[in-house]
Amino acid sequence: MDTKGLQEKVKNFIDERDWRKLQTTKDQAISASVEANELLELFQWETGKNLDDKILNGKDPLLFKKIKNETADVFFSCLAIADQAGFDMEEAFLSKLEELEKRYDKHKVKGDSSKIPSGE
Ligand SMILES: [Mg+2]
């Protein structure tokens, strides 16, 4: 299923529960931020090396499952924002990716994250 299909599924999920009247774009944006923080909380007291060992090497399947679930929650909220605000997430994402490819020329920034400004 492509992103358009996923966005349609989120739209249907909201409409089937008649929640559209209860949620604004602001509410969805708040949900995206809350869910992103739930994801971040899973990393709170872990060092990078511990996480690599636990996640990448499959030593903590419960943590891996939680990370997957919270990441999906963030994505759901992003798709709900797109639905509520009336834009196509796939188009928005591809447009953003194109902008990033121009801003961060792969030949100039390869292997160097020091040229990536924070907050963008
Ligand atoms: Mg969550």
Image (tube, rainbow, N blue to C red):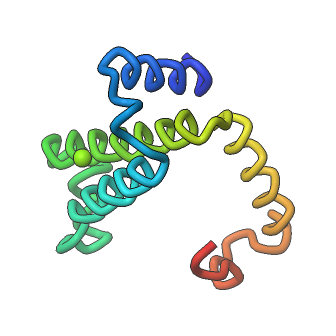
Q: Where is residue 91 in the image (x, y as percent from the top left)?
A: 73, 37
Q: Position of residue 72 (x, y in %)?
A: 36, 39
Instruction: Judge by depth and name the residue closer to the eye, 6 or 22.
Output: 22
Instruction: Judge by depth and name the residue closer to the eye, 35 or 117.
Output: 35
Kindly give the residue lying farthest to the front in the view shown. Answer: 21
Q: Where is residue 67 in the image (x, y as percent from the top left)?
A: 27, 48
Instruction: Judge by depth and name the residue closer to the eye, 91 or 42.
Output: 91
Residue at image location 73% in from the left, 52% down from the top: 96
For the N terminus, give its image quadrant.
top right
| Relative to 97, 65 lies left or right | left
- Taking 51 as reference, is 85 above or below it? above
Q: Where is residue 111 in the image (x, y as percent from the top left)?
A: 67, 72
Residue 53 found in image quarter: bottom left
For the C terminus, give its image quadrant.
bottom right
| Relative to 105, 48 lies left or right | left
Residue at image location 41% in from the left, 47% down from the top: 28
Residue at image location 25% in from the left, 57% down from the top: 38
Residue at image location 81% in from the left, 51% down from the top: 98
| Relative to 104, 8 lies left or right | left
| Relative to 13, 105 lies left or right | right
Report the label total. Answer: 0
